[in-house]
Image (cartoon, coloured by chain):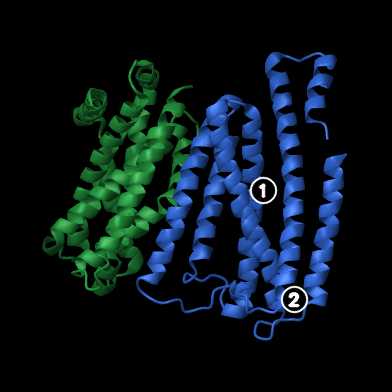
Chain colours: A blue, B green
Amino acid sequence: MGTRLLGILALVAIVGASAFGLFVVKADLNQGDAQRIMYVHVASAWLAYLSFGVTALAGLAYLVRRDLRFDAVAVSGAELGVMFTAFAIWGGMMWGRPVWGVFWSWGDPRLTTTALLLALGIGYLLLRRLIDDPARRATRAAVAGLIAAVDIPIVHFSVEWWRGLHQGPTIGSPDKILNPSAPGMFVAALMFQLLAFSLAWGWLMLRRYQLARLEWLIEEEGRLGGISAAQRAARSGEVAT
Amino acid sequence: MSALAAAARIALIVAGKDATAELRGRQATASTAFFAALVLLLFGFALGPDPTRLAEAGPGLLWLATVFGGLLTIGRLHQLEADDGALEQLALYPVDRRALYAGKALAGATAMLVLGGLLLPVVALLYGIDLASAWLPLSVILLLGAVGFAAIGTCYAALTVRMRSRELLLPLLMLPAVAPLLLAAVKATTAALAGDPLAELGSWLGLLVAFDLAMLVVGTAGYGFLLEE
């Protein structure tokens, strides 16, 4: 029941924050309506990095504790991470076309880093899909997640240098708007959307985790050749909402 | 200190075993070097006959070909374990798993060095680049690149070695992960060939060292888990 309440709350918050960002806050003078993309774009990017961070930490916890529940958290984080990363890139491109004039800018290190993050996330999910044994899958995924977690900061650093050592940034960075000089309404809309998206993220994480546990139960059942109805009821109580 | 010496000895034995297998005709390096040289030739077709353009793109093409060839090399170094069920035997030895990782990574780095060493003259010949004047920085870049690629590749190869679609999965996982290595190596090579006019060579070498160290640490910690199953 608590999960459902959180879901309803997240839905209301997203509708409210979106309406606020679309209709209440005035359009940016330079960027026009395109600037409104920034609210969902920044929120998605933040959740993308949060999700993959959760995946890496859950993988580490699995390697230490050998508890498949950590693996369920890891896969939930990875799937949400891929979704929010794709969403962030898509939003960034929709914003980039009218403001920068191009969908893709090699001059922006964040964009390049995020694209590689998406590739690593998809690779992680593919790897999981191709391993049948749960414990083996959890172990290998955990190691892959850790390599990616160490790699991403180096990727970001290298891309920043790559651009920085030769030419200065030619295009304004997308989150100039976050400067304290930005009008309070813009900041308020962003914070509202961040909160709403984070609520939705929490709800999705919980639901995906429950689903992962159920998937595991079904896999177990197949392996053990069926379990009694009483056992099933007892086990599903563990993952009920 | 003696534990470290023992680990180093095990690593050398594991790497030596791979080298022996390689010398006795497994040809992981020879055939992949030929493949990578072919890639370099085809890059020439793709970019057209303009010599200045080829020379400009040379460092990037060299490292792309090295990465493509390296994927095959690292994959085959592990395949040779899995084919004969040797990986299980390796995992059963009562020795430190970290030493086994060091050995496999050392073998991988050596193979990568050979691959890069074979490709450098090919690039020089095909794209008309003068390598002799910058041989020292180029050797350092090659060494650092080989170590980094082997450090991360050994882990990914161990991850995928017993899977059906490993030929596809290994590049899918590895290509995005080696992006910083590729970037730093290309930049360093370009700088070295131009005589380092902007004094940036040191920074890129530093980045390569950082990548190598980070991946060696993760690999040393993670490899044991992959052998366990």
Residue kind at label 2, given as amino acid type: Met
Kindly identify which residue carries mark 1.
A80
* Percent position of residue A95, x then y: 64, 73
Q: How far apart, in angstroms, are the residues tagged by discs 2 and 1?
A: 29 Å
Q: Nearer the viewer, residue B21 or A219?
A: A219
Rendered residue at 18%/53% (across/down) = B139
For residue B214, above or below residue A214 = below
Task: State which chain disc 1 sits on.
Answer: A
Q: Is residue B213 left or right of residue A146?
A: left
Residue mark closest to the camera, 2 vs 1 = 2
| Element marked by disc 2 | helix
Q: In the rendered structure, are the residues bearing label 2 and label 1 in contact, judged by CB atoms less than 8 Å apart?
A: no
Rendered residue at 66%/48% (across/down) = A80
**Residue B53, located in which quarter of the rendered image?**
bottom left
**Residue A66, located in which quarter of the rendered image?**
top right
Kindly identify which residue carries mark 2.
A185
Residue B70 in sight = no
How many numbered discs?
2
Residue kind at label 1, given as amino acid type: Leu
| Element marked by disc 1 | helix
For residue A20, above or below residue A239 = below
The tag earlier along the polypeptide, 2 or 1, is 1
* Percent position of residue A179, x then y: 60, 75
* Percent position of residue A201, x then y: 72, 50
For residue A16, above or below residue B84 = below
The crowd level at tag 1 (other Cα within 10 Å; few <14, some 14-19, many 20+) is many
* Percent position of residue A114, x then y: 54, 58
Q: Are marks 2 and 1 on the same chain?
A: yes
For residue B58, above or below residue A3 = below
Rendered residue at 77%/46% (across/down) = A203
The crowd level at tag 2 (other Cα within 10 Å; few <14, some 14-19, many 20+) is some
